[in-house]
Amino acid sequence: MHQLLLMRHAKSSWDDPRMPDHARPLNARGRQAAARMREAMRELGFAPDVVLVSSARRTLQTMEALEPWEETPLIEPMDGLYLVGAPQMLEILNGVAETARSVLLLGHNPGLHDLALLLVGRQPPAANAGAVERLAQGYPTGALAEFLVPGPWQTLGSGGGRLLRFLCPRDLPEMAS
């Protein structure tokens, strides 16, 4: 059994319209949301062995806000995760070593949302219908989905993950407003 955590970068700044998309940083609310998500992840005991993160500035800053880790994971910034679709993300996940018990993939929409829906598959488990329904409605900035992956990483595909929880920054008391 493996744990897959899919996280969308926190809210980014649009202050400089001339700035290339890849270089956009987090805004103040995004930094605050990422810090709160770090606390929530610690409370839930999330400790990824591997962090696969898009090379975009906002995803790297979101990942940095999740640090320090109790046990330092292998962190792999990847150009191949920048604004890609679900098939490309899935291909990257299929290449993860089987020794990785828990993987955090930090990326962008719409690909991240599409990947999460692909992993849930057509028949959501009745026990988590609420989380699946919330996931189906969208994937806000800073949101985190936790999946249980029963098979090997190399065969992960459609319907191959069981959604355990879907947590958004607005779910956290300090972020509600």
Image (tube, rainbow, N blue to C red):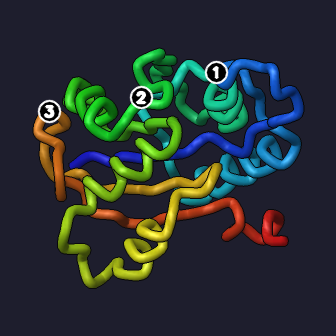
User: Which residue position holds label 3?
Assistant: 154
**Picture residue at 26% right of the left edge, 54% below the top:** 118
Q: Dot 1 lies on which element?
A: helix
Which callout, 3 or 1, points at the residue further toward the start of the chain?
1
Residue 120 percent location from the top left of the image: 27, 62
Secondary structure under tag 2 reads strand
Q: Amino acid at mark 3?
A: Gln
Which is nearer the eye, 54 or 18?
18
Q: Position of residue 117 (x, y in %)?
A: 32, 58
Residue 58 pos. (x, y %): 68, 30
Dividing the picture into quadrants, the one containing residue 50 is top left
Q: Are marks 1 and 2 in contact (CB under 8 Å)?
A: no
**Amino acid type, label 1:** His
Mark nearer the N terminus (1 vs 2): 1
Q: Residue at 34% of width from left, 48% of height from top? A: 115
Task: State the residue position of label 1.
Answer: 22
Q: Earlier in the sequence, mark 3 or mark 2?
A: 2
Q: CA distance from mark 3 to mark 2?
A: 15 Å
Q: Are marks 3 and 1 in contact (CB under 8 Å)?
A: no
**Would residue 68 be visible to someone looking at this image?**
no
Query: Which label number is shown at residue 50?
Result: 2
